[in-house]
Image: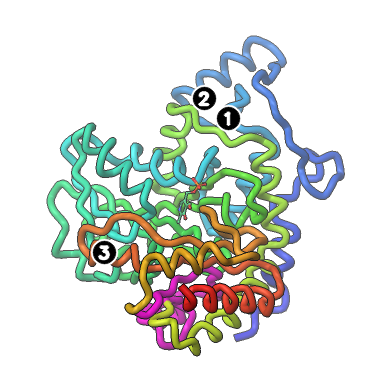
Amino acid sequence: MNKPKDEPGLQTILSHCGRNLEASGGYVNVPPYEGSTILHDDMEDLFGRVDNHLYGDGTAQTYGTDGGPTHEAFYDAMNKLEGGAGTWAFSTGLAGCTIPMMAFLKTGDHMLVTDSVYGPTRQFCEVLLKNFGVEAEFYEPTIGAGIEKLIRPNTRLIYMESPGTHTFEMQDVPAIAAVARKYNIVTMIDNTYATPLNFQPLKHGVDVVVHSATKYICGHSDVLMSTVTCNEKNWKQVRDVCKMTGQYASAQSVYLGLRGLRTLKVRLDAVGVHTRKVVDWLLKREEVKKVIWPAYEKDPGYRIYKRDYSGPIGLFAFQFQDQYTDVQINRFMDSLKLFGLGYSWGGFESLILRSYGKRTVGDPKIMRTMIRVYIGLEDPEDMINDLDQAMTKMRDV
Ligand SMILES: Cc1ncc(COP(=O)(O)O)c(C=O)c1O
């Protein structure tokens, strides 16, 4: 369906969102305002704001940690894209995944976490939250509405990540959110893969949305940051925890976040086209047993991907046939010349990793058999040639 004529398109929104010409002095983006002290006009202004900051509605900016005009511009943009009531930025992706949980959990509570969750988030739940008397139970990622049978009287939070880290299971987010609402349970999702462009979980009943902005949003592998965007009901609680725990992303980081949003769609579109070319090539290779990419029509997650996502995912995994040994697979990895061997993804450059991590509900060994690939902006033919020559070396071992 075509959009109404008076409604701007996504590229136009991305080019103009978060613009505040008064704060920027006419520059197209609000420059990085960094600092600790904010000067006040008089005592009334100072104390009035401090009271509001600590015990009032919490909106007054009294100190650098509250964020300044650059933060406001980026938050406005994220709220617009996600359909949120409020956004906060954190200094790493992991902090955005973990800290907001503190707004909802206390000793004696139970939470449900997808078994495919990002490893360090899992560790936070298994170690730190456990020390504080919170029980994290891991559930099968594709459980959908079946999550209802895991709910206990003390379940306070359901945590999702779709598709899942390394194994890429698509979750039925609307179905899980609907069950959670029935029991008044808060839902959080790590939406990093989708970006705010391809899927907006708040519009599907989720309460809190996290992005590791380190990935696609900043997009150049040179920033660490996350965003947390909430619906109206949960925003104050999350914002208060952010303030009480001193969460802050630098003005330079949020500036780069807003700049990244301007080109996000064109980067994502290119990454999607490149990824399809590489996936199609891998699917034809006899060395390859399986490719796991939810945007591929035969992937088990495709039905949900097609239903919920409006654009591509540039990250996937594949497995070699069982006959290839560990030594051979490592030879393949070591022989790659253009793919970077390193953590993270979402930048301009292609990366590759042998997967690792823990599963307690699914097959615990699955991770070691997977190779995770991120396809960047290079010419896909060059990346295919690189994979080809590395496979030749692998076979020669
Ligand atoms: C899905 C997902 N969430 C969160 C994170 C954490 O982000 P950061 O590296 O900025 O801490 C990552 C990092 O790889 C990730 O892949």
Q: Residue 108: which disc?
A: none
Is residue 299 shown in magenta?
Answer: yes
Distance from disc 1 to disc 2, alpha carbons, whole Å, reads 9 Å
Residue 309 locus on image (x, y percent): 49, 74
* Residue at mark 1: C-beta within 8 A of ligand 1: no
- Near mark 2 (Cα within 10 A), the count class, few <14, some 14-19 or many ≥20, is some
User: Disc 3 marks which amino acid?
Assistant: Lys
As helix, strand or loop, the secondary structure at mark 3 comes to loop
Which residue, as the protein is rendered here, is positioned at the far front?
397
- Is disc 1 in contact with disc 2, using a CB cutoff of under 8 Å? yes
Which residue, as the protein is rendered here, is positioned at the far top?
43
- Near mark 3 (Cα within 10 A), the count class, few <14, some 14-19 or many ≥20, is few
Q: Which residue is mark 2?
A: 53
User: Disc 2 marks which amino acid?
Assistant: His
Q: Can residue 300 be spotted in the picture? A: yes
Relative to 35, is 162 on the left or the right?
left
Residue 318 locus on image (x, y percent): 43, 74
Span of residues in magenta: 292-321
* Residue at mark 3: C-beta within 8 A of ligand 1: no
